[in-house]
Image (tube, rainbow, N blue to C red):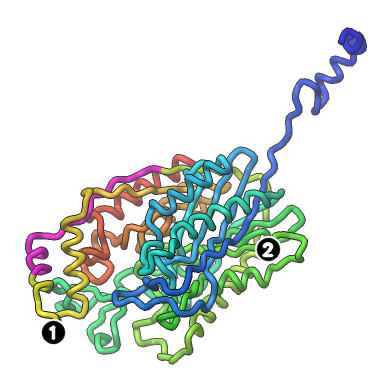
């Protein structure tokens, strides 16, 4: 040891102190990295397909496999995780279980993990199996955890960019106002001023759409340092498309979009496959059907409309991608908070009505097609415990891009308000994220009535959308 000390002359010590990689400690610039993977989450046949009211069909065929698509970003200090799963929705406790297992295995905090469902109506619920031997929840959680761990293992130097395009031809507000003085009956024996998906018989009574749409599609492009595509995530504010046979499992247009993106940007077999992701945006009052009468009715084959919507969407996202300038110096941040909302309760009159409906003989004529399921939901809301629900609200920052996550089917106008008031120049919202608590109409929309506002479809307090918007904006300000 003394011999080595004699060799370190004063001049040499000064030289080492000035060197970038000196013995005093080497400082390196953080490297932005990314990795992606897709896990197959297709359920066994025989489970209930839960996209419609009972009686629900049992899955007899798989048209296309369901996946949980995973993306991990790392700026050298903070890691963010996105998971978009082909499921109609998942309760918070399912996502929480997956997040806790990922945190235990990887060290990535649960608060830095944003999980969402696409809302395909041709999927199943983890708890809806009539066969107790099918433990789909355990399968689903394990596949999500594996997908994130695989994406993490594939982290490599990367660059990222974002932008937006427009696909207006497939978004229509499905809630329509009736003309002044006109109403439509609801299942509770009352009358509504707004109607969801009005048929041709109501067309002469319609005054116009009850809310806006958003034609934009948001695009987050992630490339390797050599220009290979790692992942391409989009966010579009459109409900599922449908046109799927009742007994078939399908990822709807969300899965078709991802397959087209992955095929268009495929790399050779020496690299991990490209992963496409399509997150559901605020579209609780939007679908792909034009009820104005301006679009000619076309009879389509199963999956035909899905392919049309996905094809148009993929083409626009790929076009936007070509215009983007990717960079590797973005800052990543995350923030979460819980908001406690009161559970919506029925009035005494509604409880009395529900009891009368459920007391009817089985062969009695129904006053409304859906009166029985909503009578059951009314009594369930009366008895629900506890009287509040804790909602996890979350935001991510990626450079100058803000991303919000809300565990509801959010109306487009709420998403547009968040975008307009956000402190970020670019912002989009992912819905049915980190849980699922039903529809989230605004107070004004609640006054109009319609399916999305009915008790049992909407399950929380009247001002919930207002309080959620303010909390999301606060979180965005926190990471800004």
**Mark identifier at residue 363:** 1
Give the side of residue 108 with respect to residue 283, left or right: right
- The structure residue drawn at horizontal position 37% and vertical position 78%, both measured from the top left corner, is 57
- The structure residue drawn at horizontal position 51% and vertical position 85%, both measured from the top left corner, is 304
- The structure residue drawn at horizontal position 51% and vertical position 41%, both measured from the top left corner, is 109
Please state which of the two labelled residues, at mark 1 or mark 2, is closer to the viewer: 1
Give the side of residue 168 with respect to residue 13, left or right: left
Residue 330 picture quarter: top right
Task: Give 300 or 371, whichever is nearer the viewer.
Answer: 371
Q: Earlier in the sequence, mark 1 or mark 2?
A: 2
Q: Is residue 290 above or below residue 137?
A: below
Give the side of residue 89 with respect to residue 179, left or right: right
Say which quadrant the N terminus sits in.
top right
Give the side of residue 388 with respect to residue 144, left or right: left
Q: Is residue 417 above or below residue 211?
A: above
Q: Position of residue 111 (x, y in %)?
A: 47, 43
**Mark identifier at residue 432:** none
Q: Position of residue 298 (x, y in %)?
A: 44, 91
**Residue on which the image places disc 2:** 273
Q: Position of residue 258 (x, y in %)?
A: 58, 69
Is the residue marked by circle 2 packed among few (<14), some (14-19), or many (20+) residues within 10 Å? some
Residue 99 forms part of the magenta stretch: no
Is the residue marked by circle 1 packed among few (<14), some (14-19), or many (20+) residues within 10 Å? few
Q: Is residue 366 above or below residue 41?
A: below
Give the magenta part as a residue range. 337-355
Task: Give 466 or 294, whichever is nearer the viewer.
Answer: 466
Task: Give 421 or 306, whichever is nearer the viewer.
Answer: 306
Task: Give 195 or 323, whichever is nearer the viewer.
Answer: 195
Residue 344 forms part of the magenta stretch: yes
Q: CA distance from mark 1 to mark 2?
A: 56 Å
- The structure residue drawn at horizontal position 54% and vertical position 75%, both measured from the top left corner, is 64
């Amino acid at each position: 040891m003394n011999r080595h000390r004699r060799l370190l002359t004063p001049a040499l010590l000064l030289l080492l102190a000035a060197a970038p990689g000196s013995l005093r400690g080497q400082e390196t610039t953080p490297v932005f990295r990314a990795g992606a993977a897709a896990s197959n989450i297709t359920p066994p046949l025989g489970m209930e397909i839960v996209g419609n009211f009972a009686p629900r069909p049992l899955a007899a065929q798989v048209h296309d496999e369901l996946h949980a698509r995973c993306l991990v970003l790392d700026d050298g200090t903070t890691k963010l995780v996105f998971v978009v799963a082909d499921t109609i929705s998942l309760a918070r406790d399912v996502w929480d279980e997956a997040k806790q297992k990922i945190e235990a295995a990887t060290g990535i905090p649960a608060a830095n993990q944003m999980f969402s469902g696409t809302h395909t109506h041709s999927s199943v619920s983890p708890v809806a199996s009539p066969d107790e031997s099918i433990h789909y929840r355990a399968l689903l959680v394990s596949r999500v955890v594996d997908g994130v761990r695989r994406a993490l293992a594939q982290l490599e130097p990367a660059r990222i960019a974002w932008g937006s395009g427009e696909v207006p031809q497939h978004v229509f507000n499905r809630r329509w106002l009736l003309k002044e003085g006109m109403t439509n009956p609801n299942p509770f024996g009352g009358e509504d001023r707004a109607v969801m998906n009005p048929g041709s018989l109501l067309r002469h009574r319609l005054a116009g759409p009850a809310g806006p749409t958003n034609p934009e599609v948001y695009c987050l492009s992630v490339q390797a340092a050599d220009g290979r595509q790692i992942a391409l995530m989009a966010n579009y504010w459109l409900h599922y498309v449908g046109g799927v046979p009742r007994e078939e499992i399908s990822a709807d247009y969300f899965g078709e979009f991802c397959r087209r993106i992955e095929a268009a940007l495929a790399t050779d077999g020496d690299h991990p496959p490209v992963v496409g992701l399509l997150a559901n945006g605020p579209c609780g009052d939007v679908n792909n059907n034009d009820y104005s009468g301006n679009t000619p009715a076309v009879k389509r084959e199963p999956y035909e409309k899905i392919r049309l919507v996905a094809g148009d969407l993929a083409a626009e996202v790929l076009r936007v991608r070509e215009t983007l300038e990717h960079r590797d110096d973005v800052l990543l941040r995350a923030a979460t908070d819980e908001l406690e909302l009161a559970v919506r309760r029925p009035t005494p009159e509604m409880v009395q009505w529900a009891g009368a409906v459920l007391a009817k003989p089985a062969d009695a004529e129904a006053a409304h097609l859906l009166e029985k399921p909503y009578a059951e939901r009314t009594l369930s809301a009366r008895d629900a415990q506890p009287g509040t629900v804790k909602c996890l609200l979350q935001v991510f920052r990626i450079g100058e891009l803000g991303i919000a996550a809300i565990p509801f089917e959010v109306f487009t106008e709420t998403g547009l308000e968040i975008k307009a008031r956000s402190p970020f120049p670019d912002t989009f919202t992912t819905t049915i994220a980190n849980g699922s608590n039903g529809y989230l109409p605004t107070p004004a929309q609640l006054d109009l009535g319609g399916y999305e506002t009915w008790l049992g479809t909407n399950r929380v307090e009247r001002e919930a959308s207002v309080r959620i918007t303010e909390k999301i904006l606060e979180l965005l300000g926190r990471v800004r």
